Image (spheres, grey):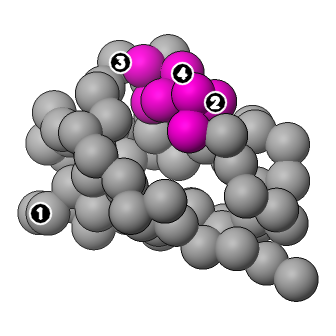
Amino acid sequence: MSVSNTYTVSGMTCSHCVQAVTGELTALTGVRDVRIDLPTGAVTVTSDAPLPLDEVRAAVDEAGYQLADADA
């Protein structure tokens, strides 16, 4: 079973931003895929099980950006 959640990340403006956020989120245990729509800031994370929001927020913060909201 996999779970997908979409978050909004603010501050991303270029492919480097996408790579930074993708790298941090991919490092979380259980993450299978990260897809980012740069113009909207939508970040869809697919994982083996639901991810704690605080872990997602910490990963985005580590990349240098801010988690704006989540549908989780």
Q: Which residue is mark 4?
A: 58
Q: CA distance from mark 3 to mark 4?
A: 10 Å
Which amino acid does the dot numbered 3 rest on?
Gly
Q: Earlier in the sequence, mark 2 or mark 3?
A: 2
The amino acid pointed to by label 2 is Glu
- Gap in Å between the C-alphas at discs 1 and 4? 22 Å
Total number of numbered discs in the rendering: 4
Asked if the residue under mark 1 is in contact with the one under mark 3, i.e. CB atoms within 8 Å, the reply is no
Q: Position of residue 28 (x, y in %)?
A: 75, 39
| Amino acid type, callout 4 | Ala
Q: Which quadrant of the structure image shows residue 67?
A: top left
In magenta, the rendered stretch is: 53-61
Q: Residues within 10 Å of mark 1 (few under 14, many from 20)?
A: few
- Observer-side mark, 3 or 4, equals 4
Secondary structure mostly seen in magenta is helix
54 part of magenta stretch: yes
Which comes sooner in the sequence, label 2 or label 1?
1
Determine whether the residue tagged by mark 2 lies in a helix, strand or loop. Answer: helix
Q: Which residue is mark 1?
A: 39
Identify the residue at image location x=82%, y=62%.
Answer: 49
Mark 1 or 4: in front is 4
The reply to whether the C-beta atoms of the residues labelled 3 and 4 are less than 8 Å apart is no
Q: Which residue is mark 2?
A: 55
Disc 2, disc 4: CB below 8 Å?
yes
CA–CA distance in space, label 2 to label 3: 14 Å
Q: CA distance from mark 3 to mark 1?
A: 18 Å
- Which residue does the image show at 49% across and 59% down from the upper left? 72
What residue would you read off at disc 3? 64
Element at label 4 = helix
Disc 2 to disc 4, how far (Cα)? 5 Å
Tell me the amino acid under the disc marked 1: Pro
